[in-house]
Image (tube, helix red, strand yellow):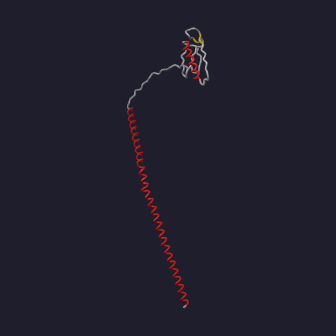
């Protein structure tokens, strides 16, 4: 009977170990279910927070932007309406102008002679028609008889002294003109 006893002890120990392992397994499974439940509650809470943000905070923010968006939209609509009005008015004017009949007018051709200029200088030896001053001030000075000033008292010679520097032809022409005017005011007509 000793072997029966050993068998009984072995069976009791094995059974106790199996019960203990089963309890540990059930306890572990229960803890896992509780942990999953807690995790699910955390996910559910996070989802509620996100949903609350989108339904509350984001909606409130968008609602605050809505008047600004509507104002910009109204301005754009007003500009579009104004442009349509301008387009309509332009079409009306174009239509009115297209109905006006303008007769053809044929003017005779006028052939003008070529009149040479003197901007580049030159010498004239007889009566001619010339264009003067076309490129700025010019001095016209008789060559053969000199200047007749002071009421016919003889030749008058004008010396123009330019003080300082002359930076352009226009400056020189202005200086010569000013000196001629001063001389004429002192002595009468120069030419």
Q: Where residue 125 sits: x, y (%)?
A: 59, 14
In-front residue for pair 145/95: 145
Residue 140 figure quarter = top right
Q: Where residue 45 sits: x, y (%)?
A: 45, 62
Q: Where residue 22 sits: x, y (%)?
A: 50, 77
Residue 137 figure quarter = top right
Q: Is residue 163 above or below residue 56?
A: above
The number of numbered badges drawn on the structure is 0
Q: In this rendering, does residue 191 appear at all?
A: no
x 54%, y 88%: residue: 5
Q: In this rendering, does residue 112 appear at all?
A: yes
Residue that extends furthest to the bottom in the rendered view of this protein: 1
In-front residue for pair 130/98: 130
In-front residue for pair 98/108: 98
Q: Quadrant of the C terminus?
A: top right
Direction from residue 36 to residue 149 in the image, left or right: right
Q: Quadrant of the N terminus?
A: bottom right
Q: Where residue 188 sits: x, y (%)?
A: 54, 12
Residue that extends furthest to the top in the rendered view of this protein: 153
Q: Is residue 178 above or below residue 2?
A: above
Q: Is residue 179 above or below residue 152?
A: below
């Amino acid at each position: 009977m000793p072997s029966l006893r050993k068998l009984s002890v072995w069976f009791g120990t094995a059974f106790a170990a199996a019960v203990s392992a089963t309890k540990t397994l059930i306890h572990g499974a229960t803890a896992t279910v509780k942990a999953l439940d807690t995790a699910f509650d955390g996910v559910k809470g996070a989802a509620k927070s996100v949903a609350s943000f989108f339904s509350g905070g984001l909606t409130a923010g968008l609602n605050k932007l809505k008047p600004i968006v509507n104002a910009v939209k109204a301005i754009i609509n007003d500009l579009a309406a104004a442009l349509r009005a301008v387009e309509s008015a332009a079409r009306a004017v174009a239509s009115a102008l297209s109905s006006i009949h303008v007769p053809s007018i044929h003017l005779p051709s006028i052939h003008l002679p070529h009149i040479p200029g003197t901007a580049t200088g030159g010498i004239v030896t007889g009566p001619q028609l010339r264009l003067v001053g076309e490129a700025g001030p010019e001095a016209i000075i008789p060559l053969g008889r000199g200047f007749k000033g002071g009421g016919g008292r003889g030749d008058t010679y004008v010396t123009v002294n330019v003080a300082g520097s002359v930076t352009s032809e226009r400056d020189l022409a202005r200086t010569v003109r000013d000196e001629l005017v001063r001389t004429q005011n002192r002595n009468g007509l120069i030419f």
